[in-house]
Image: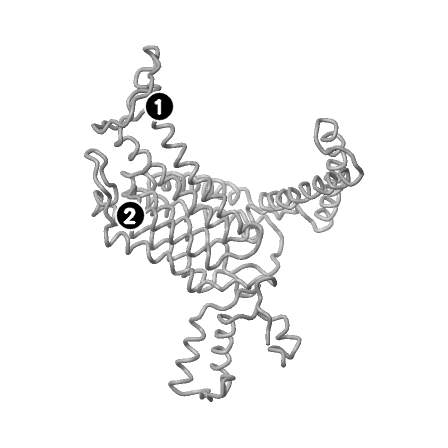
Amino acid sequence: MTRASETPADATAAPTGPRHAARAALRRAAVEPGSGTGTALPRSGPAGRAVGLRARLLAPVADRGNALHPGAWWLWALGLAVAASRTTNPLLLGLIVGVAGYVVAARRTDAPWARSYGAFVKLGLFVVGLRIAFSVVLGSPVPGSHELFTLPELPLPGWAQGIRIGGRVTAEQLVFALYDGLKLAALLICVGAANALANPARLLKSLPGALYEAGVAVVVAMTFAPNLVADVVRLRTARRLRGRPTGGVRAVLQIGLPVLEGALERSVAVAASMDARGYGRTAHVPTAVRRTTDVLTLGGLLGVCAGSYGLLAAEGAGYGLPLLGAGLLAAVVGLRLGGRRSVRTRYRPDRFGPRSWLVAASGVAVALLMIRANAHSFDALHPGVVPLIAPELPLWPALSVLPGLLPAFVAPVPPASPAREEPSA
């Protein structure tokens, strides 16, 4: 029996498996005279160029050099969220959630933050149930003729006119609440997909120089929180081994003091290391540049907020996109100017490569296509509840969601964990 890898370099390469083995054989065939299966392929010529092109189009195994930029995942997810905000059709919302879930299943790693997608799905289901419960208890302005049941109604004073607790519950108001809750759930799931795919530490590392201090503070907080939890678990285990109680006020106080002491020691150590590395050192910037930076940054952020509201509102599509673009441009210029005061270097910065641009463009394309479909097929994207009709899946809006699947094919494939690797023969 021979090993699949004989050199130390191959021993630390990507994990084995049928899919990875096929990709590796195809890449070797593009540059070697033989593919390892007894078939010789030319280095040049039409056949060699075709194999080389196919090898370049296949998604490579992710490593530190070709990893996708975390901002690309967020742009993709926000594009899906904008598309979900333009419709209440449950079939289209389910299609958007399915696209997000497929991409997460295909490109999610085994990192701790990648497990957050399930929590967002559960949160979305909770939001749907809560929205329906509020509609049942507090009523709904949607009129309906299909009465399901009647709850005891509480009398309210005159100043609370328009609000009721209890009363008749109709099928129309429940369906309206279901559609509204599904839209909110789809928004949450899209954000959860970005959280599961984007590395939060690398995302904070990619912040512009003007937000350097805020990024460092968030990174330190994210680093300290798991340490505090680990300290609490370690101390509770030690008390349990000594036969001491781990519950109650007295046990909490006895555990809390060592935890706070360890946090204080880590804080002093981090402060000393940051001071040794010159943290907080700034360069001199002219007053005119500082004022211009403040105006551009503040105005750009206000434009982004107003444009985002316009995109999410049903009647703001006309001014939302231009305002969002102008706000983003002003904010980028302001942050670029503000980065002049930060005298620091960035070690191995993440770059927006061609695959990152493709992933981000797929999300933006879904948002733009859905906005256009909302202007031309409003009734199909917002099925009516009075009278109560069954929703239908419109063809063109459904096809507009499919570009969101592109990251599942162009994003680098995450390496499998050691537990999932197959033994090499």
Residue under the point 70% across and 41% down: 233
Front one among 1 and 78: 1
Disc on the earlier residue, 2 or 1: 1
Left or right of 149: which side holds 194? Answer: right
Residue under the point 40% across and 44% down: 327
Image quarter where the N terminus lies is bottom right
Badge 1 amino acid? Leu
Q: Secondary structure at mark 2?
A: helix
**Disc 2: CA contacts within 10 A as few (<14), some (14-19) or many (>=20):** many
**Disc 1: CA contacts within 10 A as few (<14), some (14-19) or many (>=20):** some
Residue at the farthest right position:
242
Question: How far from the left and from the top, in percent, is residue 333?
Answer: 46, 49
Badge 2 amino acid? Ile
Front one among 378 and 25: 25
The answer to whether 158 is drawn above or below residue 104 in the figure is: above
**Label 2 vs label 1, nearer the camera:** 1
Residue 144 image-quadrant placement: top left
Residue labelled with disc 1: 138
Image quarter where the C terminus lies is bottom right
Residue under the point 70% across and 39% down: 232
* Cα–Cα span, label 2 and label 1: 32 Å
Front one among 296 and 403: 403
Left or right of 353: which side holds 183? Answer: left
Residue at the farthest left position:
387
